[in-house]
Amino acid sequence: MIYRARLLAAITSAVSLAAISVGSATADGGATTDDVYGYADFYGIPHLGTETVSGSGCGGDGSIGDVIPDGYWRGYVAAITGGTLQIDLVCVYGDDVDPVLVAEWTAQHPGQPQPWVPDGFMVNNSDRLRSVPTAPTFLAHGAAWTGSSCLLNSPSTPPEFDRDVWIRIVGGQAQWAVSSCTPAPGQAPSGPSAPGPTGYTFPYATFYDVPRLGVEEVLGTGCGGNGSLGDTIPDGIWFGWIDSLGPSSLQFDVACIYTGAAAARYYDEYHASPELQADDPSPYLYGSGLWLINNNDRTRTVPLAPGYVTAVAAIADPTAPHPNWPSAGIDHACVPPIDPTITPAYYSPEQASWTGAWLQITNGQAQYALLECPHD
């Protein structure tokens, strides 16, 4: 989650926290509830504007002037006084976030954890404040977890304006401001391309569904195939092999699963080179359009986070025969376990040294490793 230091005491003293009805919501961009909020889940407000962000926009393309139009807007509330709300808009890019944007943010903020939130990648390029008049029936409160949903309609929850908020503007006036849910271990959902802040939370449907998340044309955050990776592996999700695992750190050999034009180029180079074929007579294809390369066996040290776990993916169909590599790619669904302490019956611990894995690093520490489904 993203936090900010704000003048919470000054804000809450100026805002009524009572549940004030302002009538049924209009259908802004296909609203799904008939109350003032329009949507049920804080993290479920979709793209409603021309920018590829949650809500009506954020001005990341320079389209928002001094006046914020009607709609749903994400940001940080700086003050609510005299019938006016001051807000600093932010952009939350969902599962279609441009990997170049992620890489650029990471390069501009060395050593900082990537700003993933449950519904995407949150970016704030400036601290510019904009004023919005508040409606006579304006209300402010926090959202609250109910199961796996962070409910907007939670008027009894006190607001936390050091957290990000949604505001809704109708007729040029802010109808409400709702702050995001306080993190609750095991409750907060993860976005489709947003690894959880700590612990085991693999956010993709199968082992092979990790998308390209960085500037390199590979699955995951990167691999250093362009020489960009130094002694320390940055935050992100990385493919490779666990060379050794100790009580406080592990040694990880990063590899590249190329996709797109890069995969096609390496595929052609391999089949045109008898030397490459002799060196590796059985290359891993990882299915159509992907190509695995590990140029060296260099390992890097990654400290372990408290609660680190090595999980093992399993075949989705428990009645399927022991899997094998087919000649044309993967023919089975390799899914992450719900309980990371449960491993497939045909798995043996020694497989960890030669089974590929996704390693999630957050705040410089390995949160978990997900090993690929055991195979011949």
Image (tube, rainbow, N blue to C red):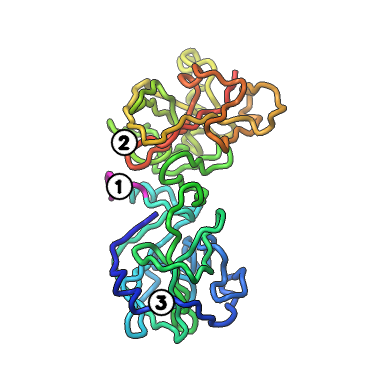
In the rendered view, tell whether residue 245 sits above or below residue 75: above
Rendering coords of residue 320 (x, y %): 71, 26
Q: Residues within 10 Å of mark 2 (few under 14, many from 20)?
A: few
Mark 3 or mark 2: whose residue is earlier in sequence: 3
Closer-to-camera residue (263/249):
249
Q: Disc 1 to disc 2, how far (Cα)? A: 17 Å
In the displayed orientation, state which residue is furthest to the top.
278
Q: Main secondary structure of the magenta part?
A: loop
Rendering coords of residue 299 (x, y %): 34, 24
Q: In terms of secondary structure, where does tag 2 sit?
A: loop
Q: Disc 3 to disc 1, how far (Cα)? A: 30 Å
Quadrant of residue 312 in the image?
A: top right
Q: Which mark is residue 228?
A: 2
* Numbered range of the magenta stretch: 108-114
Q: Which residue is mark 3?
A: 68
Amino acid type indicated by mark 1: Gln
Q: Which residue is mark 1?
A: 112
Amino acid type indicated by mark 3: Ile
Quadrant of residue 126 in the image?
A: bottom left
Q: Quadrant of the N terminus?
A: bottom left
Q: Disc 3 to disc 2, how far (Cα)? A: 40 Å
| Left or right of 332, for residue 355 | left
Q: Residue at x 66, y 30 (%)?
A: 331
Q: In terms of secondary structure, where does tag 1 sit?
A: loop
Mark 3 or mark 1: whose residue is earlier in sequence: 3
In the displayed orientation, state which residue is furthest to the right.
319
Nearer to us of marks 1 and 2 is 1
